[in-house]
Image (spheres, rainbow, N blue to C red):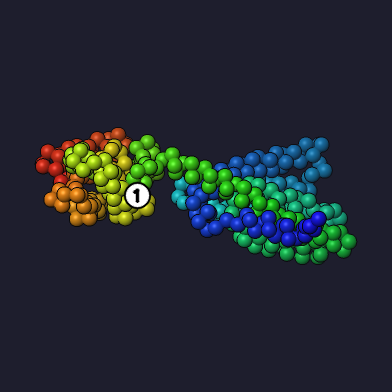
Amino acid sequence: MRKINLFTFLQRTLGNMNLSKEDYYDVQEEIQENNAIILFVTSFFLSIIFLFLFVFTFFPFGQMFIMHRFLYILMFMAFIMIFALAGYIYKITEGCFLFLCYFEVFIFIVYSVILGIYHHPNTNAVTYIIIMFVWPILFLDKVWRSAIFFGISCIFFCIESVLNKPFDIAYIEILNVLISYVLSICFTKYANFLRIRDFLALHMIEIERDTDPLVGVLNKQALVREIKKNILVSNKTGIMIYLDIDNFKSINETFGFEVGDEVLRQIGDCFRDIFRSTDIIGRYMSDEFVVFMPKIGNLDIAKVRSKMLMEFMEKEIHLPDENVKVHGSIGIARCSKNGDTYKSLKSKVDDAVYEAKCKGKNQIVINEN
């Protein structure tokens, strides 16, 4: 029977759980949302718990914890501050959430050091070890960053144990912490792999659900949903561009549906090349495309992009009959200063497309209302 080396087995197992930068990038939004929710929930409930413990020390049956009273109120203030900061940062940027997550864990590590080393020097500290295993269950981050953070905290914890605890207790404490650190990193890698794999699977399902299979841009349902969401997020600022391909029915009838499908695919590719990755691009109807450019108010930018699109259609898309050119009517509208809903903005851009059709097609019309 073949012998199994435990170290080799663990190495292979953990090696198969590697996640690439692309994997993290693909589910970055899901990771940030997860961390934001956990930060809100944990900071709120921890502040409530420490407030309860503080009040508890004033009752006769809580006198044994009176020495921790000042620590409890400090922890309450720290976590209520994190909760308030989380709410403030969430409105500005999601990038600072990870720092705030680590800060929350740092506060709890400080609490575990004070409790397990300074207040109870003759007993083994348990709270710090629990933190190392709870972290990967709650928050998501790259393993190397967690390893550095907890590695530094482990060194500090071990030094403080040696300086403030009896030698025999400190020796056991250091051994426990080092073993827990290694196991925690392995557990972090395993937990990250499982959760990010689930996020990736869900992400792929959402992409397949929201993508038009022919053109590769958003389908109508996803397009409308994303525009509505972005109008709210961008404080009702942005520009909508609406392309209606002229005489597309005639192209299908004259040259066949395969040629028509190829025209649509090339136009979809052109949209992705011309517009920003943050712009919302979708196929609204069979021969109609819509783009929403969030947080943009300059109509000249939209007009330049639209001209590039029309030039591409006329010069780069070739039909079997070279005398027949592909062109379209484009309407442009931006959110008003008072703000627009999706319905009102779509109505304005519809009017612009209709006007372009009435002027003889192959036109760009801007609705400045």
| Horizontal side of residue 24 vs 285, given as left or right | right
Q: Amino acid at mark 1?
A: Asp
The reply to whether residue 167 is visible in this rendering is: yes
The residue at which mark 1 appears reads as 279
Residue 319 coordinates in the image, percent (x, y): 20, 49
Q: Nearer the viewer, residue 165 or 169?
A: 169
The front one of 46 and 206 is: 206
**Relative to the observer, which residue lies in front, 224 or 74?**
224
On the image, the x and y values in percent for residue 364 come to 17, 47
Residue at left 15%, top 40%? 357
Q: Quadrant of the C terminus?
A: top left
Is 291 left or right of 246, judged from the image as shown? right
Residue 14, percent from left and from top: 67, 56
Q: Is residue 114 left or right of residue 289?
A: right
Numbered disc total: 1
**Residue positioned most to the left:** 359
Which element type, helix, strand or loop, lies under badge 1?
loop
In this view, the residue farthest toward the right is 168
| Picture layout, residue 40 above or below residue 128 | above
- Image point (56%, 53%), residue name: 98
Q: Is residue 4 left or right of residue 298?
A: right
Residue 275 x/y as whole percent: 31, 53
- What's the residue at 53%, 54% (across, down)? 24
The answer to whether any part of residue 228 appears in the image is: no
Picture residue at 39% right of the left edge, 39% below the top = 222
Image quadrant for the N terminus? bottom right
Q: Residues within 10 Å of mark 1 (few under 14, many from 20)?
A: many
